């Protein structure tokens, strides 16, 4: 006997409340390692690009919270910010020198 809209063939338990989206992309641990790799590589090449990528990957890997407890993601955000800051300072210094134009 079905009651309150439940037939005999439908599930009575609600959907899982832990995740409400399909898991198709990389998980948080992988994003933290990708962000950390981008942050370290950004100190050597393309810091103006890899720094913000490291910040974004680390922030998403932390779940957009500071108290997530994932160390690689937090290190990726901090190193990405330092990397971006150093790249901007280098660009400002290169632009102020003029490189012999004037």
Image (tube, rainbow, N blue to C red):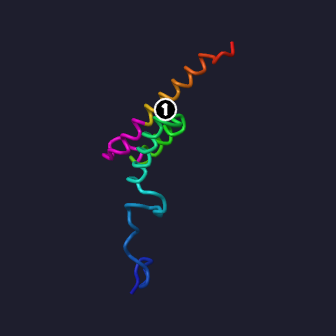
Q: Position of residue 48 (x, y in %)?
A: 53, 34
Residue 5: name its quadrant: bottom left
Name the foreground residue: 88 vs 57. Answer: 88
Q: Where is residue 100 in the image (x, y as percent from the top left)?
A: 66, 15
Instruction: Give the farthest residue toward the right.
Output: 101
- Membership of 66 in magenta stretch: yes
Return the residue at label 1. Answer: 84
Image vertical order of residue 47 relative to residue 3, above or below: above
Q: What stretch is highlighted in magenta?
A: 63-79
Q: Which quarter of the figure is the N terminus placed in?
A: bottom left
Q: Where is residue 95 in the image (x, y as percent from the top left)?
A: 60, 20
Q: Which quarter of the figure is the C terminus placed in?
A: top right
Instruction: Give the farthest residue toward the front.
Output: 100
The number of numbered badges drawn on the structure is: 1
- Membership of 57 in magenta stretch: no
Image vertical order of residue 92 relative to residue 44, above or below: above
Q: Residue at x 56, y 25 (%)?
A: 91
Instruction: Give the farthest residue toward the top.
Output: 102
Image vertical order of residue 61 relative to residue 3, above or below: above
Give the crowd class for mark 1: few <14, some 14-19, many >=20 residues within 10 Å. many
Q: Where is residue 23 in the image (x, y as percent from the top left)?
A: 45, 62
Q: Which residue is drawn at 44% across and 33% down?
A: 81
Q: Which residue is drawn at 47% across and 35% down?
A: 44
Residue 8: name its quadrant: bottom left
Name the foreground residue: 83 vs 3. Answer: 83
Name the foreground residue: 102 vs 55. Answer: 102
Side (left or right) of 90 relative to 39: right
Residue 40: name its quadrant: top left
- Classify mark 1: helix, strand or loop: helix
Instruction: Give the farthest residue toward the bottom.
Output: 1
Q: Residue at x 47, y 61 (%)?
A: 21
């Amino acid at each position: 006997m079905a009651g309150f809209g439940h037939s005999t063939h439908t599930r009575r338990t609600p959907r899982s409340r832990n995740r409400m989206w399909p898991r198709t992309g990389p998980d948080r641990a992988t994003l933290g390692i990708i962000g950390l790799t981008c942050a370290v590589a950004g100190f050597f090449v393309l810091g103006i690009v890899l720094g913000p990528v490291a910040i974004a990957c680390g922030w998403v890997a932390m779940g957009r919270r500071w108290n997530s407890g994932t160390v690689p993601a937090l290190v990726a955000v901090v190193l990405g910010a330092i990397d971006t800051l150093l790249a901007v300072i280098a660009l400002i210094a290169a632009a102020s020198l003029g490189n012999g134009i004037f």
